[in-house]
Image (cartoon, rainbow, N blue to C red):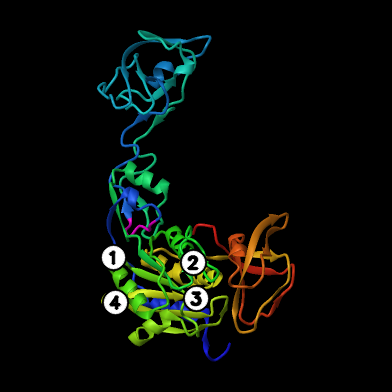
């Protein structure tokens, strides 16, 4: 590794040491989808909370119908009816039946439910032509969840099924950390908003959409700021205006060695932002530090779209997940078989865009496009990154390689 570069792992370690998870507080259930629980959740009630019917049919005393068959049916008087949410009938006597609907409370004295299909659906009297087993079609109180059960462990990322469970046990909220507010700024006097006229020396700003969308998919609240020209004062003014709503700032462009690298020029005098090279390809020029009175973390990413996106995946995504209390911080890797040979510069960790497929022998990954960090079309066609270690200069077709799957939730 060249002496003037730090490793990917060193840079990430420095970032994570500087990131403190956001404070947690109770949030309404629907606001917590995709966030991590910041508490263990213990059941304070049973599910079901009462014995209830699993079928539309008749609640009976099992011993009254144990011998019922089509050849020798049992006839019982129907003494009442119970619908879901209409539990007025609390008990019944042996030798009778009560019409009951799915979800309705089973009255005391009943220990089985005969489905409609086994009867003549009588109103005053019911003919039962088949015997249920003892307890059949009765959902017992607490058979799903008992009071005191651990429903969710701290750190569980909340999905629809978790929220349904919490609501079912009467929890209107759960402690989570909020979604980080991420401000995304693109710098460059050559940039134009999509839809505007494009001159011969201008390009459309794709980076801010790319990075804001990546932040949103990670679970953050993303604020895409208008294009900032290559003027240090204009950049600092835009940055200071945005810090009031930022838990984290991401910029793209202006961090290399050029004459118009405005981000580096504007932030270097502060002394709180590091700029340097990371031993990776693409994405070598990086910057990270804090700005403003609240020491808001700022990531200054390179301007080429592939470099910017891979830098987000490698460094910004883990920081966002730590802010939200999610683990692991970085995407896990898996193994896949390489379809074509790959070359890599010695001393740098290379991230090769790839496309994942499955064949008879398992996962395979095909490199997509060239190595150019401007090739956003190839980036869009990729769904994986082949990670080539720093000491490896060549991988042959057919080798097993480490692959990061970009579209899988974790």
Q: Indicate which disc residue 292 carries.
A: 4
Left/right placement of residue 189 relative to residue 239 reads: right
Question: Which is nearer the N-term, disc 1 or disc 3?
Answer: 1
Q: Secondary structure at mark 4?
A: loop
Q: Secondary structure at mark 2?
A: helix
Q: Are marks 1 and 3 in contact (CB under 8 Å)?
A: no
Distance between the Cα atoms at labels 4 and 3? Answer: 22 Å
Residue hosting label 1: 23
Q: Secondary structure at mark 1?
A: loop
Q: Are marks 2 and 3 in contact (CB under 8 Å)?
A: no
Distance between the Cα atoms at labels 2 and 1? Answer: 30 Å
Question: Which is nearer the N-term, disc 2 or disc 3?
Answer: 2
Horizontal and vertical percent position of residue 303:
50, 74
Q: Is residue 236 visible?
A: yes
Nearest to the observer: residue 153 or residue 270 = 270
Question: Which is nearer the N-term, disc 4 or disc 2?
Answer: 2
Distance between the Cα atoms at labels 1 and 4? Answer: 19 Å
Quarter occupied by the N terminus = bottom right
Residue visible at 62% across and 64% down in the picture? 378
Majority secondary structure in the magenta region: loop
Magenta range: 35-40
Horizontal and vertical percent position of residue 20:
34, 72
Q: Nearer the viewer, mark 1 or mark 4?
A: 4
Horizontal and vertical percent position of residue 230:
42, 77
Crowd around label 2: few <14 · some 14–19 · many ≥20 (10 Å): many
Residue hosting label 2: 207
Distance between the Cα atoms at labels 4 and 2? Answer: 24 Å
Question: Which is nearer the N-term, disc 4 or disc 3?
Answer: 4
Q: Indicate which disc residue 302 carries.
A: 3
Residue 374 magenta-highlighted: no
Crowd around label 1: few <14 · some 14–19 · many ≥20 (10 Å): few
**Residue 187 found in image quarter:** bottom left
């Amino acid at each position: 590794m060249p002496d003037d570069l730090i490793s990917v792992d060193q840079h990430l370690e420095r970032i994570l040491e500087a990131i403190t998870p956001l404070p947690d507080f109770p949030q309404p259930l629907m606001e917590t989808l995709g966030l991590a629980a910041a508490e263990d959740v213990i059941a304070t009630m049973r599910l079901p909370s009462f014995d209830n019917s699993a079928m539309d049919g008749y609640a009976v005393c099992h011993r009254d119908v144990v011998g019922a068959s089509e050849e020798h049916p049992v006839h019982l008087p129907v003494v009442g009816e119970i619908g879901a949410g209409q539990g007025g009938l609390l008990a019944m006597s042996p030798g009778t039946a009560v019409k009951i609907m799915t979800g309705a409370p089973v009255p005391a004295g009943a220990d089985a439910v005969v489905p409609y299909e086994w009867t003549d659906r009588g109103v005053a009297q019911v003919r039962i032509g088949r015997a249920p087993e003892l307890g059949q079609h009765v959902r017992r109180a607490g058979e799903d969840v008992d009071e005191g059960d651990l429903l969710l462990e701290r750190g569980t990322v909340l999905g629809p099924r978790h929220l349904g469970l919490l609501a079912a046990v009467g929890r209107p909220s759960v402690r989570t950390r909020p979604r980080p507010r991420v401000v995304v700024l693109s710098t460059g006097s050559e940039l134009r908003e999509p839809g505007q006229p494009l001159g011969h020396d201008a390009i459309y700003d794709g980076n801010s959409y790319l990075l804001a969308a990546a932040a949103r998919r990670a679970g953050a609240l993303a604020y895409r700021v208008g294009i900032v020209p290559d003027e240090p004062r204009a950049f600092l003014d835009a940055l200071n205006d945005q810090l009031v709503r930022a838990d984290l700032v991401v910029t793209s462009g202006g961090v290399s060695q050029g004459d118009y690298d405005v981000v580096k020029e504007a932030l270097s005098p502060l002394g709180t932002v590091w700029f340097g090279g990371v031993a990776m390809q693409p994405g070598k020029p990086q910057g990270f530090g804090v700005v403003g009175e609240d020491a808001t973390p700022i990531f200054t990413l390179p301007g080429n779209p592939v470099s910017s996106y891979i830098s987000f995946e490698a460094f910004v995504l883990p920081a966002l997940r730590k802010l939200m209390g999610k683990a692991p911080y970085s995407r896990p890797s898996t193994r896949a078989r390489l379809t074509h040979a790959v070359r890599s510069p010695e001393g740098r960790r290379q991230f090769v865009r790839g496309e994942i497929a499955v064949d008879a022998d398992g996962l395979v990954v095909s490199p997509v496009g060239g190595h150019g960090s401007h090739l956003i079309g190839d980036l869009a066609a990729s769904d994986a990154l082949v990670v080539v270690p720093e000491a490896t200069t060549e991988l042959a077709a057919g080798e097993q390689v480490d692959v990061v799957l970009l579209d899988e939730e974790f």
